[in-house]
Image (cartoon, helix red, strand yellow):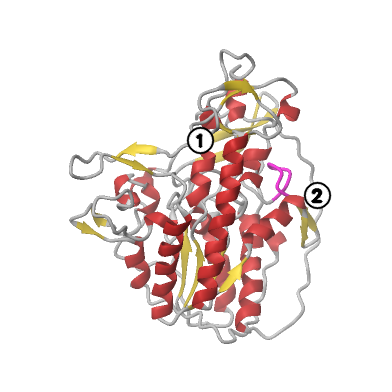
């Protein structure tokens, strides 16, 4: 078992009071939940603790699965099929006591991970961790960088869907949406069109595709998406749902810099001067300087610090583990631009919007659900998992309730919200 050194976090037990929801008749309103399809990335697929795992029903409680169970109360005939892993799945992070200290360590992948999913099954949850919106819709140029990312990068999280072969028989993500026959959908695509770049320290994530000319030899799998390209492809997704007559809800992108992945390892917490290397998109690429409060160290920078990296100018924290102040500004500005396109596209197609940007900003300041206070602190905040990026099961229940609120308002439905305190938070040893 490989150990990952994080800051040791103290925690306190808190009591919770279950909310007693008002009695009301469950009704679908003008929505038809018979065939609910969820599209999105890791937040939709149910990733938490840096992996896809299900030993305590983590993936069984993705927000679409929670939402589908509530929909089923008004539509008993609906069937929601989610591709789930066995037990440890792709591997993940968990807490264990080591020499009297609570630390985050790695659990290896389950032996069944290499055969994840069954491509002959028609799934309702189409979430794929790591996928960008721009990867979901084919590009207009024959050999453009928008060639199927799932194939070229060999993304194992998408193995449950058949994507064919590069160029000769490609099956796009959009093709799967068009074949879904959805009557209702949630669309939370777009996060990775900024998040992947940010969590890689402002890096485009160029990988070798293993292909030779005239095919693309490399692919930038985490490059931020141009707003114009984003809008064109977002429209294509909503066009597909509109043609099949589906109703649904789109969701905006949260501020990627507000998550615990970027707010836990701080100069204040370390209590010392920290030297960093500026990234390729900063105003001075490769420059080594002292970090300021405007720079964000990633959660993985704690491993560097534990190894003695970052305390002298000659050995700075590498740019891959830092989002410097210029990159922070770039990522925040791009989120705003992409959210404008999401809202405009949803409005043009007549679909409701769940404003997750505002909602997750409110969570950072602190919200109370079922008598329990939540915020965006690592571990102590209660809603995020051990990777500092994705929610834990409790957090996914909170997100499901936000979608329920918007669905009820937009479609006159009366879907019952879930009691968030009934779901697991972080699993302690």
In this rendering, the answer to whether 380 lies above or below 336 is above
**Residue 151: percent from the left, percent from the top?**
30, 50
182 sits to left or right of 409: left
Residue, disc 2: 14
Find out whether the residues at labels 1 and 2 contact each other: C-beta distance under 8 Å. Answer: no
- On the question of residue 167 being in view, the answer is yes
In this rendering, the answer to whether 19 lies above or below 201 is below
In this rendering, the answer to whether 4 lies above or below 370 is above
In the foreground, 80 or 259? 259
Residue, disc 1: 281
In the foreground, 144 or 240? 144
The question of residue 287 being in magenta is answered with: no
The magenta span reads 375-382
Which image quadrant is residue 119 in?
bottom left
**Residue 184: percent from the left, percent from the top?**
49, 76
Residue at position x 56%, y 12% in the image: 314
The question of residue 379 being in magenta is answered with: yes
Secondary-structure class at tag 2: loop
In this rendering, the answer to whether 195 lies above or below 270 is below
**Residue 88: percent from the left, percent from the top?**
48, 45
Q: How many marks?
A: 2
Task: Say which of marks 1 and 2 sits in front.
Answer: 1
């Amino acid at each position: 078992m490989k150990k990952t050194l994080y800051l040791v976090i103290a925690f306190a037990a808190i009591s919770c009071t279950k909310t007693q929801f008002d009695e009301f008749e469950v009704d679908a309103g003008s929505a038809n939940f018979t065939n609910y399809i969820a599209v999105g990335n890791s937040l939709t697929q149910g990733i938490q603790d840096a992996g896809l795992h299900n030993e305590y029903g983590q993936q069984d409680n993705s927000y679409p699965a929670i939402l589908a169970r509530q929909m089923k109360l008004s539509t008993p005939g609906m069937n929601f099929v989610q591709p789930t892993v066995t037990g440890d799945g792709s591997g993940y992070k968990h807490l264990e006591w080591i020499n009297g200290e609570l630390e985050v360590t790695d659990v290896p992948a389950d032996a069944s991970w290499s055969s994840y999913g069954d491509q002959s099954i028609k799934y309702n949850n189409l979430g794929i961790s790591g996928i960008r919106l721009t990867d979901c819709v084919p590009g207009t140029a024959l050999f453009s960088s928008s060639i199927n990312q799932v194939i070229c990068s060999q993304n194992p999280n998408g193995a449950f869907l058949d994507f064919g072969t590069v160029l000769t028989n490609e099956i796009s993500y959009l093709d799967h949406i068009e074949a879904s026959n959805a009557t209702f959908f949630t669309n939370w695509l777009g996060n990775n069109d900024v998040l992947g770049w940010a969590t890689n320290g402002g890096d485009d994530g160029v990988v070798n595709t293993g292909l030779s000319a005239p095919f693309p030899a490399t692919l930038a799998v985490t490059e931020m998406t141009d707003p114009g390209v984003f809008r064109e492809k977002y429209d294509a997704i909503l066009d597909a749902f509109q043609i099949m007559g589906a109703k649904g809800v789109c969701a905006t992108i949260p501020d990627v810099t507000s998550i615990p992945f970027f707010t836990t390892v701080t100069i204040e917490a370390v209590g010392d001067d920290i030297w960093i290397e500026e990234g390729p998109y900063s105003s001075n690429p490769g420059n080594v300087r002292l970090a300021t409060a405007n720079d964000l160290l990633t959660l993985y920078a704690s491993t560097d610090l534990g190894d003695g990296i970052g305390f002298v100018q000659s050995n700075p924290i590498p740019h891959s583990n830092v989002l410097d102040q210029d990159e922070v500004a770039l990522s925040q500005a791009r989120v705003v631009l992409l959210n404008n396109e999401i809202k405009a596209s949803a409005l043009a197609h007549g679909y409701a919007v769940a404003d997750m940007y505002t909602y997750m900003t409110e969570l950072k300041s602190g919200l109370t659900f079922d008598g329990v206070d939540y915020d965006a602190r690592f571990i102590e905040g209660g809603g995020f998992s051990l990777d500092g990026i994705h929610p834990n099961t409790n957090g996914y229940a909170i997100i499901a309730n936000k979608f329920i609120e918007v669905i009820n308002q937009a479609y006159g439905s009366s879907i019952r919200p879930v009691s968030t305190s009934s779901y697991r938070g972080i699993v302690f040893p």
